[in-house]
Amino acid sequence: MDMQPSRPQALCRAAGAGHVQNVLGVTHIYKALSAETANAFSLHEAIVPPGAGAPPHTHSREDESFYVLSGEVVVDLEGESQPIRVGAGGFVYGPRGRRHAYRNASEREARLLVIATPGAGLEAMFDAIDAAGQAAKGMPPLDKLLAIAAQYGVAIQPPA
């Protein structure tokens, strides 16, 4: 009897195709869901309008990496003395346990590839945030957002 774990199937996804979410005004288009990679990682393209981004938050279960495809984002990393501007071709690694945030500070849309390792968790959290935003017909209430994130091991730092 063969006891080797099953390997994931090969995956190819066309431009613009994939599971789509709206997370706090940022469109996520999944190129690889965690279920498709045996939970090794998930990968989504984030389309970030001017002024949008992710608030300061800390992951307890996964690392998060960002590769800027186009535009420019400002990244705040715990431990850095000041925010860092990252343009096309730039990369940021946010290890679990280290607070980070990003926002598009330009007047043009930015596009990022976002990799979560391991994969499970974040995409489910983002689905829940998307659903809460749809129910609220806009941004979900802060208390709902904080509660959803906490379920998935993510602590969002509320605005002061």
Image (cartoon, helix red, strand yellow):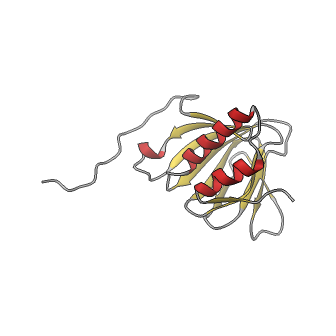
Name the residue: 58% across, 55% down: 152
Position of the N terminus, as image quadrant, is: bottom left
Q: Nearer the viewer, residue 71 or 151?
A: 151
Position of the C terminus, as image quadrant, is: bottom right
Name the residue: 55% across, 45% down: 124
Percent x, y of residue 102? 75, 52
The correct choice, above or below, for 47 with respect to 61 in the image is above
The correct choice, above or below, for 76 with respect to 53 in the image is below
The image quarter containing residue 84 is bottom right
Percent x, y of residue 88? 72, 45
Looking at the image, which residue sits at the far left? Answer: 1
The image quarter containing residue 136 is top right
Q: Nearer the viewer, residue 129 or 147?
A: 147
Q: Nearer the viewer, residue 156 or 79?
A: 156
In the image, 67: left or right of 136? left
The image quarter containing residue 50 is top right
In the image, 42: left or right of 2? right
The correct choice, above or below, for 81 with respect to 75 in the image is below
Name the residue: 16% across, 53% down: 2
